[in-house]
Image: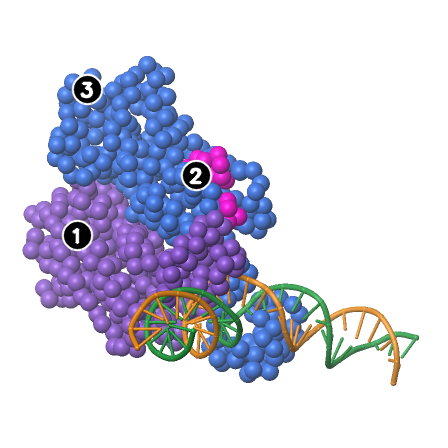
Chain colours: A blue, B purple, C orange, D green
Amino acid sequence: MDVANLSGVSKSTVSNVIRGAGRVSDATRRRVLDSIEALGYRPNALARDLVRRRANTVGVMVGDLANTFYAGLVKLLEVEASDAAYTTMVCNTDGELALERARVETLLERAVVGVVLLQFSGDRMVLDALRGAQVPAVVVSCHDERVDCVAVDDRAGMSAAVEHLYDLGHRAIAHVSGHLVEDSTRAARAAGYEAAMRKHGLPPRLLSADDWENGDPGAVRRLHELVSGNAGLTAFAAGNDVMAVRLIDQLEAGGLRVPEDVSVIGFDGIELGAHSRIGLTTISQPREELTTRGLELLLDRVRGGSVAAPPRCVTLEPRLIVRHSTAAPRA
Amino acid sequence: MDVANLSGVSKSTVSNVIRGAGRVSDATRRRVLDSIEALGYRPNALARDLVRRRANTVGVMVGDLANTFYAGLVKLLEVEASDAAYTTMVCNTDGELALERARVETLLERAVVGVVLLQFSGDRMVLDALRGAQVPAVVVSCHDERVDCVAVDDRAGMSAAVEHLYDLGHRAIAHVSGHLVEDSTRAARAAGYEAAMRKHGLPPRLLSADDWENGDPGAVRRLHELVSGNAGLTAFAAGNDVMAVRLIDQLEAGGLRVPEDVSVIGFDGIELGAHSRIGLTTISQPREELTTRGLELLLDRVRGGSVAAPPRCVTLEPRLIVRHSTAAPRA
DNA sequence: GTCGGTTTGTGGAAGGTTCCAATTTCACGG
DNA sequence: CCGTGAAATTGGAACCTTCCACAAACCGAC
């Protein structure tokens, strides 16, 4: 080590100075610091991590980083993690199981201290790999009893969405979900929808957004027929805001008006939903709390080394925000 | 190494099998593979990277990951990088110089092979650090003659935006920029705006979006007065789509209609702009080409080791997309 | 001076790979 | 059988830290 030579001390002392550990006299410290400066020396994190057998990195797996809700979460995670002196490794899985597994392997090879799972598929192999490597994980914004998780009560949230529509007078309400990312959130929301519908003795109707989002004109036509045809749908409870916003686009492109002809409610509370042109009624999730608590749970285990302790789940309350994409159905 | 013992070979052979390098007989290979499987062995990337003196990671620095345009770029980069067998380390700088410098240091300590700079401030120290460490960098979606870069011609793009407004009949056109992230893009767009205004002998008028975006009611009032008062502004050329969309929100919240009372044009071409409710006229950037070419330039240097070769700049053509946020001014 | 005790500094093993030169094994022609 | 060259395998140094037990230096007090 050149720094050691230049300042005439051993590499151990240099290490002590850099780590701020051990006792080093002020004179020596300054000398070493000067040499570091003069040589433009930069510590090698790879070597440090190798001997420590863990990188100061937390992995973040996300289904679709282009979904603004998750991009927001990732940003918060990155910022909060680096406040806690961890770097972040972001992996996009595109909702594909194979990719998810592969990426977790990559993260594990890189010896991350922990992994945040966003839009987690719930795959057992992923969880097993993590557990096997003694790497703690936290699922954020999905529920999963097998690991730490912090999420909104998706089921209740979606039920509340349906109740909101019901209260407005809607009876023919469809649920719209996509299949790009199949996480537990998706299922929970669908379940919340079905439960609420059943409670009121209404027939559930599940639609897939993929049909029309791929720009298939036939699908778009079918969508419109659901509203103007016999089905007589008067409201849609979308699985998330991004889908809701696109749905409004599709509906209006076909001449239907929201909320005059048909109501749409979303889920997540993306910023854009508040735009006056959109005015999306939605079930909003507390983003910052989600990430803060999530990272808290994760780092707790990282520091305590208590990987094996039973999972703790934090459930947050989603909040109905009524804007102007929902209204009473036409008489 | 346990795998070596179990399969009765040396660790070198195990290494050869894993790397797919050197010549290994089929029988041995199978034996080693079986042991790996049986032991659930996972190679240690830290050790590998240490001896190779480089991690198979590309760093990505972004000013604001919550800006959907950049989130989209980051996603594309992540996907393309991992197709090329690189992992990605994403750093959010919040447009703060100190953070930018600190993060570049972090990336360098982790021995990334290269860095993609999104919304780069242009800071000399960052560039010097990179060069000093022999780590290639590419600036994407900003121009910078000191490094490889691929970007749209922001200046020309913004001039085209002004021309579009001018052709519609607008004369009192303001440019709106934010200050959260001060990259070269921001300056180039402002310059393009000013050049176009000057060309037509019109007085430039520069506004900062920060004023009203912070929810300062006074600022919002002043914004409205610019339109309805003496200034008589009839159009805004926003520095980017996100600002444009928010601007529309602010204007309409105050009772002005877009485009009837005032026109707004954006820049970037975010997906949302295409929404029928928004219909943002904009100067669109080819996102995928930006990232693909950018990564190409970067990996080219990584593989060739030609860090010192003169910088190459790729300039792409932005494209005017006319939707319905711009129209002729009221007579 | 010498002796404890504290503070400061050090030597070297360990961490898990890669990579290369060197060695062993193998197959085959003579 | 031997010799030969190619193919397969191996040993060990190197990568750059951390960390710990230990050594040295220093400081009063006796």
Amino acid type, residue under disc 3 in the picture: Ala
Tag 1 and tag 3 share a subunit: no
Question: Residue at left 12%, top 35%?
Answer: A217
Q: Between marks 1 and 3, how big is the CA–CA gap?
A: 39 Å
Tag 3 and tag 2 share a subunit: yes
Magenta-tinted stretch: A131-150
Q: Which mark is residue A231?
A: 3
Question: Residue at left 15%, top 66%?
Answer: B195
Q: Which residue is denoted by mark 2 in the rendering?
A: A124
Report the quarter where the C terminus of chain A lies: top left
First in sequence: mark 3 or mark 2?
A: 2
Q: Which residue is denoted by mark 1 in the rendering?
A: B282
Toward the viewer: A198 or A4?
Answer: A4
Horizontally, residue A149 falls left or right of residue B305, namely right
Residue A10 vertical position relative to residue B280 in the rendered view, above or below: below
Q: Between marks 3 and 2, how big is the CA–CA gap?
A: 39 Å
Amino acid type, residue under disc 2 in the picture: Arg
Q: Residue B59's spot in the image, x, y percent?
A: 36, 62
Q: Chain of mark 1?
A: B
Closer to viewer: mark 1 or mark 2:
2
Amino acid type, residue under disc 1 in the picture: Thr
Magenta-colored stretch includes residue B133: no
Horizontally, residue B149 falls left or right of residue B102, namely left
